[in-house]
Amino acid sequence: MFQGCKIKAPFFEIGPKSYLYGDDILDLAKAADAASEKYKVDIIFTCPLVELRRVKEATKFIHVFAPHMDPLKPGRGLADTLPESLVAAGAEGVMLNHCEKQISTATLRETILRADEVGLTTIVCADSIAEASAIAHLAPNIIVAEPSELIGTGKASDIEYVEASTRSVKEVNPDILVLQGAGIKCYDDVYRNIFAGADATGSSSGIVALPTREARNQMVDDMIRAVREAWDARHNK
């Protein structure tokens, strides 16, 4: 059953993946927290598992998500990620089916149900318009419309893809939020996607591949400002 989502549009997702670790993760999370408060934009911070509790305890405004979980229940499952353990560590949600951690449709269905059971918001990645539509029938909270061939390339989806993929989800379930990802590298990419009708966008390498903390933090501020300005312009036009 589709559960109520704590995230409100417009929002933004930051996924450090394994580009950063340790104190660099914490510094980025604090920059995201400051930008969320400043621009009144929800931010999902998809945090490395080992940093979940530390990031959660050091921030107030961002929504801390895990990068994956398994559908098991308490008991056996050495090295698997237990949903209840994510909740205990402070996670509010979980990302599923990223192109770097894909799972089968059957497992995805089961994992979304387990997330619903423990109260975790689900953000699920889709590689195509057809997959986005199919995943919408599984009733996650958020779908990421992200062609895998564009991830990390600095080339964003075109407007036609943004509009068509958003529509394919909303036609199945208008309550599902749609994040348009892949290739987001600057203010203009963010603004274009939000203004074109996306509920959200996000970035990984466009932020975390920058060489210094100062540059990464400034890019976070620029991108969140773009979300706010594009959303306001779209609703006031």
Image (tube, grey):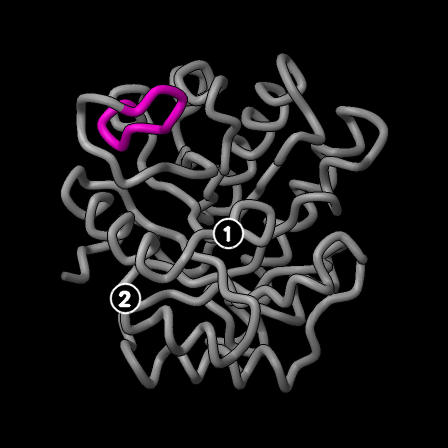
What's the mark number on residue 138? 2
* Magenta range: 77-85
What's the mark number on residue 199? none
Circles 2 and 1, Cβ within 8 Å, touching? The answer is: no
- Of helix, strand and loop, which mostly describes the magenta segment? loop
Task: Please give the name of the residue rendered at 25% of the width and 20% of the height, measured from the top-left corner.
Answer: 88
Out of 130 and 11, give the one closest to the viewer.
Answer: 130
Queried whether the magenta region covers residue 79, the answer comes back as yes
Residue 138 on image: x %, y %: 27, 66
Q: Which residue is mark 1?
A: 102
- As drawn, 123 above or below 120: below
Out of 71 and 192, give the one closest to the viewer.
Answer: 71
- As drawn, 167 above or below 229: below
Task: Please give the name of the residue rendered at 26% of the width and 65% of the height, measured from the top-left corner.
Answer: 139
Determine which quarter of the picture holds residue 161. Answer: bottom right
**Mark 1 packing: few (<14 Cα in 10 Å), some, or many (20+)?**
some
The disc labelled 2 sits on which kind of residue? Leu
